[in-house]
Image (cartoon, rainbow, N blue to C red):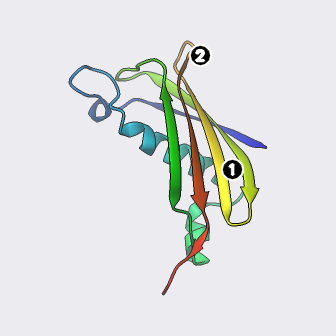
Amino acid sequence: MIEHEYQFRVAYPDTDRMGTVHHANYVKYYETARWELLRSIGLPYSELEAAGIMCPVVRMNFKFIKTTRYDELLTIRTTLKQVEGARIWFSYKLYNEKLELINKAETELVFVGTED
């Protein structure tokens, strides 16, 4: 297993009328964390694309545990769990500044070629 940590602050536009991070933003957060993990092992997504490889997400699961608000410093711990054939699985744990688990997720992606 390969792990990587990614930190960022919650931006104001990511919050909803209730003052918490809107659930749609977790997709964006985990997308960024996933590609930062790949970059950290020397495989930036731009190089995959240049080689004619795309990685669409085919499955996502989220568990919302706690809410978070604007300007909080968050940490995502991303784990590359498994690569099997043309599929790759990641898990994510999202922590707030108090190191409380606020969300966890899993994604499954597939490697596909592009048609140029």
Give the percent coordinates (x, y) of residue 59: 52, 50
Q: Are marks 1 and 2 in contact (CB under 8 Å)?
A: no
Q: Residue furthest right?
A: 1
Quadrant of the rendered image containing residue 100: top right
Seen in the picture, residue 105 relative to 57 is either above or below; the reply is above
Q: Amino acid at mark 1?
A: Ser
Q: Earlier in the sequence, mark 1 or mark 2?
A: 1
Place of residue 80 in the rendered image (x, y in percent of width and height, measured from the top left): 70, 46
Q: Amino acid at mark 2?
A: Leu
In percent of width and height, residue 65 lies at 49, 20
Quarter of the image holding residue 98? top right
Numbered tag placed on residue 20 in the rendering: none
Return the residue found at the far left.
17
> Which numbered circle lies on residue 99?
2
Q: CA distance from mark 1 to mark 2?
A: 23 Å
Q: Residue at x 50, y 35 (%)?
A: 62
Q: Nearer the viewer, mark 1 or mark 2?
A: 2
Q: Dot 1 corresponds to which residue?
A: 40
Residue 80's place in the image compared with 26, above or below, is below
Badge 1: few (under 14), some or many (20 or more) residues near its Cα, within 10 Å? few
41 or 83: which is nearer to us? 83
> Relative to 57, is 78 on the left or the right?
right
Q: Secondary structure at mark 1?
A: helix
Please give left or right for residue 79 compared with residue 103 in the image: right
Residue 18, position in %: x, y?
A: 24, 20
